[in-house]
Image (cartoon, coloured by chain):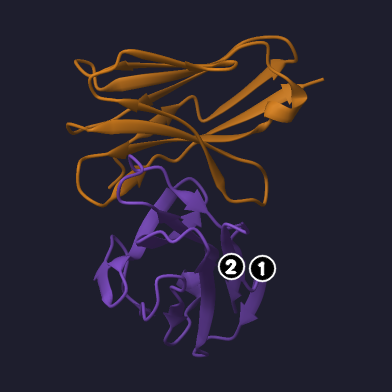
Amino acid sequence: SQQGEEDPQALSIQEGENATMNCSYKTSINNLQWYRQNSGRGLVHLILIRSNEREKHSGRLRVTLDTSKKSSSLLITASRAADTASYFCATGTGGFKTIFGAGTRLFVKA
Amino acid sequence: NAGVTQTPKFQVLKTGQSMTLQCAQDMNHEYMSWYRQDPGMGLRLIHYSVGAGITDQGEVPNGYNVSRSTTEDFPLRLLSAAPSQTSVYFCASRSPTGGGIQYFGAGTRLSVL
């Protein structure tokens, strides 16, 4: 069963707009990560937020975490065509395993 | 560093055939994993290893075997391929002290006819 579920499943925006993707999960976590996957490629780690953090920034990325609602959001500001990819949240629960959601497909139109 | 290298990139098998998907990493990571990715399903863990000589099952281990004789290599064996094993397979590695950040290979796209 999946721990993280992303919303929306797909998102299409114009270049320069902001893109927001949400992730909900079911059990307590130690951390939550976001990964990007370009078409036909492997996943690339973007950002990790720990359970005791509420917000984290990395360049044009902003991640928030609300452990009371068991949810996280990824905001990409000033989107570029090169941001077109699938984005996955992944939860770490303290053991070895990381559980991935089904992903949000983002399409940024030039 | 090459990171995580998977071979082959593409493979077509007939039902019942066996094959080995190769995975090698040059980051001296103790932890390695195999995932399969199917449309709308995210990544599902097949097998994983926390060090040479130590492997364990993930969420969907049936039909697959693994071994870990060295830190660098973690091959995945399909014993008798079935159409249900048509998927994209990813190998990943991470350090036990890296906060859980995983490094992925480019994937192997497998079709079983």
Chain (orange): A
Chain letter of the residue carrying label 1? B
Q: Are marks 2 and 1 in contact (CB under 8 Å)?
A: yes
Residue B109 makes an appearance in the image: no
Which-is-in-front pick, marks 2 and 1?
2
Q: Are marks 2 and 1 on the same chain?
A: yes
Looking at the rendered structure, the kind of residue marked 2 is Gln
Residue pictured at 60% horizontal, 79% vertical: B113
Looking at the rendered structure, which numbered label has been put on residue B9?
1
- Residue A34 location, x and y as percent? 45, 32
- The subunit carrying tag 2 is B
Residue at 31% in and 21% down: A71
Residue B11 against residue A55 in the figure, above or below: below
Using the rendered view, name the quadrant where residue B13 is placed: bottom right
* Frontmost residue, B69 versus B35: B69
Distance from Cα at disc 2 to Cα at disc 1: 7 Å
| Residue A88 at x, y percent in the picture | 47, 36
Q: Which mark is residue B6?
A: 2
